[in-house]
Image (tube, rainbow, N blue to C red):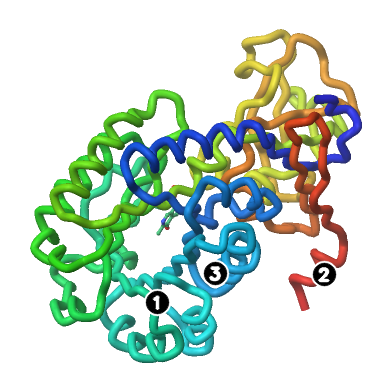
Amino acid sequence: MNTDTIKTPCYVCEEELLENNLKLLDYVQKESGAKIILALKGFAMWSTFPLVSKYLKGCTSSGLHEAKLAREEFCKFNPHAEVHTYSPAFKDEDIEEIAKISDHIVFNFPNQLFKFKERVKEINPHVELSLRINPEVSSSPKDIYNPCGIYSRLGTTLANFDERVLEHIDGLNFHALCEQNVDALEEVLVAFEEKFSKYFKGLKYINFGGGHHITKKGYDVEKLIRLIKEFKAKYDVEVYLEPGEAVGWQTGFLIATVLDVFENGMHVAILDTSAEAHMPDTLAMPYRADVRGSGEAGEKKYTYRFGGNTCLAGDIMGDYSFDAPLKIGDKIIFEDQIHYTFVKNSTFNGIKLPSLAIYRKDGVLDIVKEFGYTDYRGRLS
Ligand SMILES: *Cc1c(COP(=O)(O)O)cnc(C)c1O
């Protein structure tokens, strides 16, 4: 791909890499019998949905806007696709529209289920209801990504479980993982079954949530398939997985341009992007994004600190080294910036949002969206 002519900043999703992920997920579906749906929270580039909807069985959404996007942009390519909608708390003003466009509604707490069950069934008699469980076991690598931590607001614990929900629900959900291998799922399943399997009788499905890093190298896909098959056989239920990150994992990059380079105790390069606004998880997780052709600080001859084009002192991507000095106008490629980036983007400090592009299998770079002043202005009032 010729990256010289790309107007930066731009996220480029590589169609072929995305399809490889989808094929692996489909293999899991076919071998295990589970249904896999896309968590829009982690990947919502709807211009790829003609492709994604060929493989995945629907979307999981948190609230009205994601549910609408799923219904409008995913289901039109796959009329059998399912829309699952969960929210920590649904609002009165949203619930009717959510009921109309959802196949499954997942409540966070028994209160919410009792409050809304009649209304949603009146509007959509086919809607299936579920309760999100907090199994209180998770080996999530960071507290901010641990839904089962102390005082968690996400899901119903055994102590808070109200058996009266059982006559109204079709399934149970849990979501307890973050970027994890199948051993972590196995641990959660042990706790989940120990506490809740007494309630499985008569349920149609159990949703194992997201955080399964299925498309990462080294993930034990065969063990996942085995666990799902055993679970399905033991309890006679459908199993859903709803990964977000695993769909967009390593499917493309964020490309930026060097705007200036100078020396202030070390070499500093200013880029036309921002860690804060465009690569939020590099600060929140935090982690260091790989840059194509670079090494660690000091590893190669020329080391630079990369900073964004905002006034936030901490808007820094990290220190990177190169074989040759950087020049103004050079392109910088941050790898693996498709999942959990533009879904969280902001126009912090008025900085321009990166365009969205798909690098097609036939070699054409398709710019599917560009942003400008009106997008920034339109988010404010
Ligand atoms: C975030 C989330 C997911 C997707 O998680 P990934 O880590 O992106 O796979 C799925 N289900 C729920 C309820 C979530 O909150």
Task: State left or right for residue 364 relative to residue 157.
Answer: right
* x and y, in percent, of residue 22 in the image: 53, 39
Instruction: Classify 257 as above or below 381.
Output: above
- Residue 263 quadrant: top right
Q: Which residue is mark 2?
A: 377
Quarter of the rendering occupied by the C terminus: bottom right
Type of the residue with mark 1? Val
Q: Position of residue 370 (x, y in %)?
A: 83, 53
Q: Are marks 2 and 3 in contact (CB under 8 Å)?
A: no
* 133 lies above or below 223: below
User: Which residue appears at 50% of the width and 72% of the height?
Assistant: 63
1 or 2: tag closer to the N-terminus: 1
Q: Secondary structure at mark 2?
A: helix
- Mark 1 / mark 3, whichever is N-terminal: 3
Q: Secondary structure at mark 3?
A: helix
Q: Sequence order check: which comes first, mark 2 or mark 3?
A: 3
Q: Position of residue 52 (x, y in %)?
A: 58, 47
Which residue bears the numbered disc 1?
127
Q: Nearer the viewer, residue 183 or 298?
A: 183
Q: Nearer the viewer, mark 1 or mark 2?
A: 1
Residue named by callout 3:
67
Query: Residue shown at 50%/53% (left/top)?
Result: 38
- Cα distance, mark 1 to mark 3? 14 Å
* Residue type of the residue flagged with mark 2: Arg
* SS state under label 1: loop
- Which residue is depicted at the point 21% across and 66% down? 203
Mark 1 vs mark 3, foreground winner is 1
Residue 254 or residue 306, whichever sits in front: 254
Residue 145 in view here? no
